[in-house]
Image: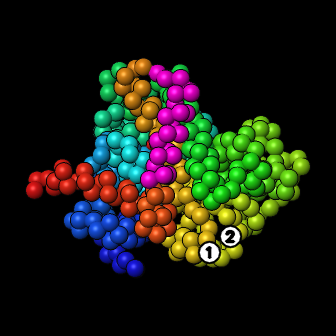
Amino acid sequence: MEHTIPSSEAHLDGPLFRNARQVLEEAGQIINCDPNVLERLKYPRKSVTVSIPVRMDNYNVKVFTGYRVQYNSTLGPYKGGIRYHQNVDLPEVVGLAALMTFKNSVLGLPLGGAKGGVAVDPSKLSRTEKQNLTRRFTSEISDFIGPTKDIPAPDVGTDPQTMAWMMDTYSQEKGGYFQPGVVTGKPVEIGGSMGRNHATGLGVVYVAEKAFEKNRLSMNGAKIVVQGFGNVGSFAALFAHQRGAKIIAVSDVSGGIFNGDGLNIPELIEYTKQNKTVKGFPKSTDIGNEQLLELACDALFPCALENQIDTHNAERIKAKIIIEGANGPITNTATKILSQRGIFIAPDVVANGGGVIVSYFEWVQDIMSFFWDEDEINGRLKSIITKAFETVYKFHTEKNVDMRLAAMACSVQRLEKAMLLRGLYPR
Ligand code: GLU
């Protein structure tokens, strides 16, 4: 169904959000969702746009635009990452905030959904400029975030150091008291959690193991292609490699590399630390991003950005299974094409949920000031993510709908119950 969006709702008119709304609408019909609940779920609650003046190294001031979108807080405080990327705009952040809401709900976390971002290419900033940008952005949104209100985290283009600056800025502005619970994904020395840095990649592999099992395939010896070699893709590749999979191709922003016998992932990770790119890695040949997605393989892990598989290439994808490490890498129409072709998709809201699951643990540990060891973190992560996968898989088989619709349906069921219990304020 096509949605027409009036110009007053231009912030809702992005491809990612249009896709999310469409799945929401379809899932709502399947579960017979209360129409008033469904109507409310189609809109972000609050969208904040800020200008961020930054002193650059040449002493000139440059102004960047930043956003924080708080989508829904029915189930708990707002939660979601901060993205630094040149293509960030408000409609994209709205779409990502909606996905966080449905992700946190389907995972069973006591958290709402939000997302933030700044339109900037972080690779063009010096460390000082990135710190200046982060601190001023945090200051601009400091009245909207907080340990009981809205808890940011890393996303594309941000990392534990960025979270350290956010936490410090917020703490200084609120009287100078240490407030680690305001952001997650921090370094462990200042209230971060063991296992958070690799959590999204590990979650991708826990979900992949389940998906392989359901499709009667084995990860040991499987050929896997990974798009994106940042925090998600590199750890997903590493954990799959440790389980005996052959990672035959990976890519980053500058292009891809291929080795049909499998790339040595631990060595590749070392290589990228030195060279800042996967390109030129010994015992590999170059491959384009388009070609990489279309390789014959057992599983494809798209771990980069949204809208990578759409109508232009869906017919050419040859993977048997796709595990969505990124948010929104496959459009709705492509999802339908792939599903009809018998390709199994583990949808983003479950597949990349490892990050926010361990963020939830980090937030809990910060509030308690009592920290857990890594085995405990990984074990609890596995139990939450596999439980969510099983619930969604059951819905998918029982109702004969694709996994994306099933995930949305399970997510909306939980939100609907909570929203009806809370009611509409004031009435
Ligand atoms: N940015 C990550 C995501 O898209 C993590 C969010 C979080 O930990 O709050 O799920």
Q: Is residue 137 something one can see in this rendering?
A: no
> Where residue 317 is drawn, which disc sits there?
2
Give the residue drawn at x 42%, y 47%: 107
Query: Within the image, what quadrant is residue 267 found in?
Result: top right
| Amino acid type of the residue tagged 1 in the rendering | Arg
Q: Position of residue 137 (x, y in %)?
A: 43, 42
Answer yes or no: do the residues labelled 1 and 2 have beta carbons within 8 Å? yes
Give the residue drawn at x 59%, y 64%: 344
Cα–Cα span, label 1 and label 2:
10 Å
**Relative vertical location of residue 225 with respect to residue 172 in this rendering, above or below:** below
Circle 1 crowding by C-alpha within 10 Å: few under 14, some 14–19, many from 20: some
Give the residue drawn at x 70%, y 50%: 219
Along the line of sight, which residue is nearer the eye, 190 or 133? 190
Identify the residue at the far right of this view.
283
Q: Is residue 65 magenta?
A: no
First of labels 1, 2 by sequence position: 2
Q: Position of residue 108 (x, y in %)?
A: 38, 45
User: Disc 1 or disc 2, which is closer to the eye?
Assistant: 1
Q: Position of residue 196 (x, y in %)?
A: 54, 34
Give the residue drawn at x 42%, y 26%: 365
Q: Secondary structure at mark 1?
A: loop
Q: Secondary structure at mark 2?
A: loop
Mark 1 lies on residue: 341
Which portion, as a residue range, is magenta?
371-391
Q: Is residue 385 magenta?
A: yes
| Amino acid type of the residue tagged 2 in the rendering | Ile
Query: Within the image, what quadrant is residue 257 found in?
Result: bottom right
Along the line of sight, which residue is nearer the eye, 204 or 189? 204
